[in-house]
Amino acid sequence: MNQEGRRAERRALGGKPRHDLTGFPATVGGMTMWTEFAAAAPRIAATFTRRHAATGNLCFLATVRQDGSPRISPMEPRFFEDRLWLIGMPDTAKFRDLARDPRFCLHTATVDTEVKDGDAKLWGVARDVRDTALHQRFAEALFAETGFDLRGREFDHFYAAELTGASSVEVGGDHLKITVWKPGRPEYVVEKR
């Protein structure tokens, strides 16, 4: 991202730089652009997008409750302008969780106990992007795609998924192929028999 892009992003984030929980800038500790993630972790990205599409966008979002225990919620994350967005019904517990503690894990949904089509999970930090023009472009695209009309409405939260890790599982005969990715490293495959 160039200097002007970083300035625009800071304005959208209320003047604050993007940082993950380790304190590293997002260009080191996490990624915003889906194409960047897909280039670094093509196998995991392919499994995630395939499963995401096969379930009509349905995934399961893990967040941290106020008391520190986990919460699992169904949601339909969406790809828009080369980012993965965690957007949904306002004033829900999952979004209150993210406002308090931005860590999340997103898992593809499946009913296939043999996992023939693979399975993927992404984890990272959710960033609330306050950009009215972006929100309205998203609402227009959502209406064009689904007929669901959020045009002209204000979004309470608009979370970008900043990825800090990912993995996928594929079944290969008598073994599992587990692909793992972490920032700054290429994805790698571990086989379990």
Image (tube, rainbow, N blue to C red):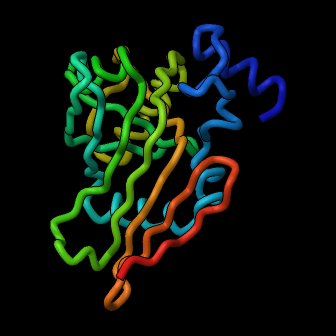
- Residue 68 position (above or below residue 186): above
- Where residue 133 sits, quadrant-wise, is top right
Q: Nearer the viewer, residue 117 or 64?
A: 64
Residue 54 in the image: state x and y as whole percent: 29, 65
Residue shown at 56%/41% (left/top)? 81
Q: Position of residue 65 (x, y in %)?
A: 24, 23
Residue 6 position in % (x across, y down)? 74, 24
Residue most extreme to the bottom: 173
For the question of whether residue 152 can be seen, the reply is no
Q: Is residue 109 placed above or below 157 in the rendered structure?
A: below
Residue at point 63%, 11% (across, down): 16
Residue farthest along the right direction in this orientation: 3
From this viewpoint, is residue 149 visible?
A: yes
Say if 76 sits above or below 158 in the image. Answer: below
Residue pushed farthest front?
A: 193
Q: Residue at x 38, y 35 (%)?
A: 104
Task: Please identify the quadrant where the C terminus is shown.
Answer: bottom left
